[in-house]
Structure formats: structure tokens, C-alpha cells
Amino acid sequence: MKHNELPSERYFGDLEQVFTFYGAMPTGVTISENGRIFVNFPKWGDDVKFTVGEIVKNKLVPYPDLNTNKVDYNNLDKCFISVQSVVADGSGTLWVLDTASPNFSEPIKDGAKLVSVDLATNKIKRSYVFSEDVVLPTTYLNDVRIDYRVGDAGYAYITDSSDKGPGAIIVLDLSTGKAFRRLNGDESTSSDPNFLPKVEGKILLNRNKDGSTSRITTASDGIAISPDGEVLYFCPMASRNLYFIQTKLLRDRNITEAELSAKVKYLGEKGASDGMITDAKGVVYAGDYENNSIRTIMPDGTMKTLVHDPRILWPDTLTIGRDKYLYFTANQLHRQARYNYGKDQRQKPYVLFRIKISELPAPTK
């Protein structure tokens, strides 16, 4: 029997290639209600010409313009420094989460923020700049979900995926601009100390140029909100565990951290994920970066694999369009130099994929 006739791993799922990136490595992607596609590029060492872009007529252009993507130290609330996540709310606004942490540095003072952009005018509406008791020196702002059904103007829930300090869920009142940390350093927002990820057949570790190694310790990263806004799902990146909590508990400052921790529910092992998203029926979609896959978690807790494909080299951010497709970036994060003794193993292009799920995105209002 010839080698190519031997049994081999079975791949499945009708994956479509949407766009290829030959420049900087993307993380976040989002689709507006009108089908506009936005992508972001954090400053992790690549030559990032703009940290937020839009795919227009199959070309990548800076969004909203090149000037906004240049660091202006006199107007840090009006520029993008190093963006980790972009989220369109389905109602005409693009939310831009700016870590202000190029190369995972300590966040630039007064630079870490959540910015709302009016998609009709492509102008910044408001910048929510985080105070130093919310964005700590160790904080890395990762992903955000919006719900307009609570409070005077809605709330945002943001993951702090720090690998050097406490993970947390940051809760932001969009009316007052007040934010606070919840589940700070909790087991549910922290890396699993026994977690050893295996990607492309190899154990994934921080592997430094000097030959030293250490475990991956990235905290709460993936986040998804139920269609009614009542439940928040979240997961540390350095873990295979899925957790959820009622959002009303997160918003209630009268509930102590200890009481809040006791209210977190464990949903089981779902595979190791970076990004997550929910559809209008309440199904959670989660990347499975160890297995080149996307998983689905049904409302009753049952799980299945939606797509398994060798091209899914680190599924990062997931988003759902009104066209009823699930979109996600595959950016080879694990092949970066920091995991390979200083040698960059990534092969361009990075890819934006999609797969038909025949469901709409979860509403925000």
C-alpha cells in the first residue's frame, strides 16, 4: 500500500476562504449589519501600518482613516494605539477595544479604552478611558460584548487576559463611563495551572531565545453573551474549561467577590479556545486551537464539532454575520517567535474563513 493510500485523520466542514492577509497578523474580526467587515491588528512585533482596518472591495484599508491609527500622545482618547478586538453591535456602532499595550507592555497611561465609532459617519462617538484601578499594570484587554437592554445606555463586559497578573471580567456602564473589575483573580478567570496545550502535535510553551521555557498562563479571553443578555460565558485561554455567570450578578456592586465566585457555574471541558460567540438561538461557538476545529455548545450543554480542517491554524476571533455565516480568523498565533525560541514559524497568508451556520447573530438589544 502506498503512503498516500494509508488511513489518515478525517477532516470535515464546508470551510470557505474569505480574505488572505500578507502583512501583519490579524486577531479580531467583526461583521456589521450591512455586511461590512472590520479587522484589527495588535502591535505584537509585526509591521502594523494600521491597527484597525476594513475590507473594502477585497482590499484592506485603514479604518476609519490612517490618522486615527497613528498614536497621538496629546489625544490618546482619539487615536488607536494597539487594538485587540473590534465588535459591531448590529445597530450602527463599531466598538474598538484598545489595549494600549504594544508588545504586551504595561498599558500606556490614559491609553487603554473602549471606543464607539458611528458606522454611518465613520466618526468616533465616545471613548471610555479606563482608570488605573480597572486597567492594572498587568492588564491586557482582550474581548468585549455589549448589551443595551440594561442600564440607561447599556453595559459592556470585557475580558482581562493578563498572563502576568489577575484575570478578570471588567464591567462598564456605558451611560456613566464607570467601570469595575469582577471575578478578579478568580479560578474561573485564571489559567489552569495543570494545562499543557498541544498544537500541531507539539506542547505549546513560552520558549525563549535563551532556551528557557515556561507554561502558557493567559487568563480570561473568550467571551460570549446569551441572546437575552442574561448570561455571560467566558473562558481562560490557558484552559479547556467553560464558565458562565448571570450578568445581573456581575453588575451588582453589593455582591462581594466571594459571593460572586460562588455563583459561577462550570459548564465542563469544551476544548482550548481563544474566541467565542453566540447565535440568536443561544448556541455558543468556540474555537478549539488544539484540534484545528470550531466547536458548538448547545443550550442544553451538549457539544459537537462544527468544522475540523488542517487550515484552521489557531482560530482566534469568531463573529456571525446577518448572512448566517460564522466568520473567524486563523492567524497561526502558536507559531510566533515567543513560542519557538525566538524563531518566527508563521507562514503567510493568514486567513479569514467562514462557514454557513444558518443562524443569525445574538441581538444586543
Image: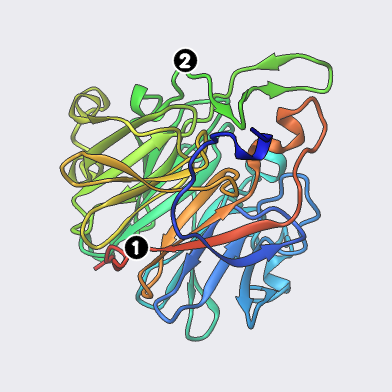
Asked if the residues shown at circle 2 and circle 1 are in contact, with their CB atoms under 8 angstroms apart, the answer is: no
314 sits left or right of 23 in the view: left
The percent coordinates of residue 41 (x first, y second) are: 66, 56
Q: What element carries label 1?
A: loop
Query: Extreme bottom residue here?
Result: 121
19 sits left or right of 150 in the view: right
The mark closer to the camera, 2 or 1, is 1
Q: How many labels does the image show?
A: 2
Q: Splitting the image into 4 quarters, where does residue 322 fall?
A: bottom left
Q: What residue is rendered at 51% in x and 45% in y? A: 142
**Crowding at mark 2 (Cα within 10 Å: few <14, some 14-19, many 20+):** few
Q: What residue is rendered at 67% in x and 35% in y? A: 2
The percent coordinates of residue 246 (x first, y second) are: 19, 42
**Which residue matches tag 2?**
193
Frontmost residue, 308 versus 75: 308
Residue 105 visible here: no
Q: Is the residue 111 above or below the residue 216 in the image?
A: below
| Residue 357 badge | 1
Q: Splitting the image into 4 quarters, where does residue 210 fall?
A: top right
